[in-house]
C-alpha cells in the first residue's frame, strides 16, 4: 500500500479510496491500494468518459421530458376543453411544442458528437441513419420541417387543433391538419417531400408524431451502442475492476488520482471519483439498445464475463 501524500520528484498515479480517519471527527485520508502507470490512469479516465456519455438519460432525457410536457398539455385540455380560450394556456401549448421540436435538433447533435468523439468508425453509419430518417421516416420528417417552421415563423402550431374523435371515452384529440399544412407550403420542395410520406393521411395525432420521432432517434442511438458493444463492454470491465481494486482494503469513496510535481516543491493533484452508478447506467444503455433492436439481452453480464459477446 502506498500513501497518497508520498513525496516524489516524479509524477505518479494511483488507485485507492478516501475514507474517514478512525477516532478523528471530520477528518479523512486518501489511501492508495494500487500504483498505476500514466497509461492505466488515462484508461480509467477514458472508460469513465465513454460510460457516462452513453447514458440514455443524458442523451435522450431532454427529449423525453419535453415529450411528457406536450402530453401533459394535451391531457389538461382534453380534461377541460374550454381552457383553449385561455391565452396563457394556448401560449403554454405553443411553447411546449416549440421546446420539443428544438430538442430534436439538440438530441441529434448530442448523438453525433458522441459518435465523433468516442466511436469514429461509426460516424458514416450514424450520419447516414439520420439522413435516411429525414428522407423516409414520416414522423421525423414532419417534426424536422415543423422545427424549421418554428424557427422562421416563431410558431409551428398554426395547423394544430383539438378534433372531436367520436369516442365517448376520449372525446378530443390534439391533431395536426396535414392537408392544410401541406397546402400552406405547397411551393416548398421540402414540404412536398414531407407530404409524399403522408400520402393518404389528412390528420395526425400530435403525440403519435412526436413519439414516433423520439422512437426513431432512440433506434439510431441503439444502433450506435450495439455496434460498439465490444468497446463499451471493455470499458465496463475496466471500470468495474478499477472500482473493486480501489476498495480492496475496505469501504470508502473510490478514486483514481495523479500527482504531478509543480514549481518550488509544490504538487498538482488530479483526482477522478469512481462512481458505481456509472456502471449501472452503461449496462442499462447496452441492454436497452438490444431491446429496441429486438435482440436478446446480453446474459454475459459485463464484469463477470466468461466468454466474448
Image (spheres, helix red, strand yellow):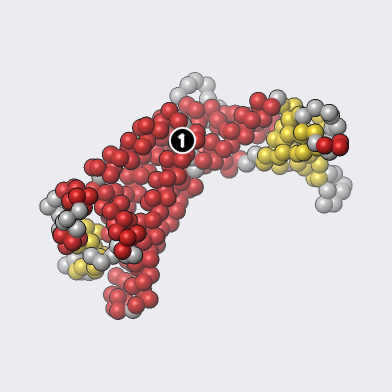
Question: What percent of the width, then of the height, locates residue 12?
Answer: 76, 29
Which residue is located at x 84 percent, y 32 percent?
6
Which residue is located at x 37 percent, y 36 percent?
126
Question: What percent of the width, then of the height, locates residue 23?
Answer: 87, 47
Q: Quadrant of the C terminus?
A: top left
Q: Secondary structure at mark 1?
A: helix
Q: Is residue 195 left or right of residue 264?
A: left
The residue furthest left is 200
Question: What percent of the width, then of the height, locates residue 244?
Answer: 66, 32
Which residue is located at x 47 percent, y 39 percent?
114
- Locate residue 273: give its quadrant: top right
Residue 64 visible (yes or no): no
Viewer-closest of 234 and 213: 213
The residue furthest top is 307
Q: Is residue 282 left or right of residue 95?
A: right
- Locate residue 187: give its quadrant: bottom left
Residue 154 visible (yes or no): yes
- Locate residue 47: give its quadrant: top right
User: 162 above or below 48?
Assistant: below
The residue tagged 1 is: 116
- Disc 1 residue crowd, few under 14, some 14–19, many 20+, Cα 10 Å: some
Viewer-closest of 106 and 174: 106
Amino acid at each position: 500500500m502506498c500513501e497518497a501524500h508520498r513525496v516524489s520528484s516524479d509524477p505518479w498515479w494511483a488507485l485507492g479510496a478516501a475514507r474517514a480517519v478512525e477516532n478523528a471527527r471530520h477528518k479523512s485520508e486518501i489511501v492508495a491500494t494500487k500504483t498505476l502507470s500514466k497509461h492505466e490512469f488515462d484508461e480509467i479516465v477514458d472508460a469513465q468518459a465513454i460510460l457516462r456519455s452513453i447514458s440514455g438519460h443524458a442523451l435522450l432525457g431532454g427529449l423525453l421530458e419535453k415529450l411528457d410536457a406536450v402530453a401533459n398539455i394535451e391531457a389538461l385540455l382534453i380534461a377541460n376543453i374550454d381552457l383553449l380560450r385561455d391565452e396563457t394556456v394556448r401560449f403554454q401549448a405553443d411553447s411546449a411544442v416549440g421546446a420539443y421540436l428544438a430538442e430534436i435538433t439538440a438530441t441529434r447533435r448530442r448523438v453525433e458528437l458522441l459518435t465523433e468523439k468516442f466511436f469514429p468508425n461509426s460516424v458514416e453509419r450514424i450520419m447516414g441513419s439520420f439522413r435516411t430518417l429525414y428522407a423516409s421516416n414520416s414522423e421525423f420528417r414532419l417534426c424536422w420541417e415543423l422545427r424549421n417552421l418554428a424557427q422562421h415563423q416563431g410558431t409551428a402550431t398554426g395547423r394544430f387543433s383539438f378534433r372531436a374523435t367520436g369516442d365517448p371515452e376520449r372525446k378530443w384529440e390534439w391533431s395536426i391538419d396535414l392537408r392544410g399544412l401541406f397546402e400552406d407550403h405547397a411551393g416548398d420542395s421540402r414540404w412536398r417531400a414531407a407530404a409524399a410520406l403522408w400520402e393518404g393521411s389528412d390528420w395526425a395525432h400530435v403525440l403519435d408524431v412526436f413519439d414516433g420521432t423520439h422512437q426513431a432517434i432512440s433506434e439510431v442511438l441503439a444502433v450506435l451502442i450495439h455496434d460498439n458493444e465490444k468497446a463499451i463492454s471493455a470499458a465496463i470491465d475496466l471500470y468495474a475492476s478499477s472500482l473493486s481494486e480501489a476498495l480492496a482494503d475496505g469501504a470508502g469513496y473510490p478514486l483514481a488520482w495523479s500527482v504531478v510535481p509543480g514549481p518550488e516543491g509544490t504538487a498538482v493533484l488530479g483526482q477522478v471519483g469512481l462512481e458505481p452508478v456509472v456502471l449501472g447506467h452503461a449496462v442499462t444503455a447496452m441492454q436497452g439498445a438490444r431491446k429496441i433492436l429486438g435482440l436478446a439481452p446480453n446474459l454475459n453480464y459485463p464484469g463477470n464475463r466468461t466468454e466474448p459477446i
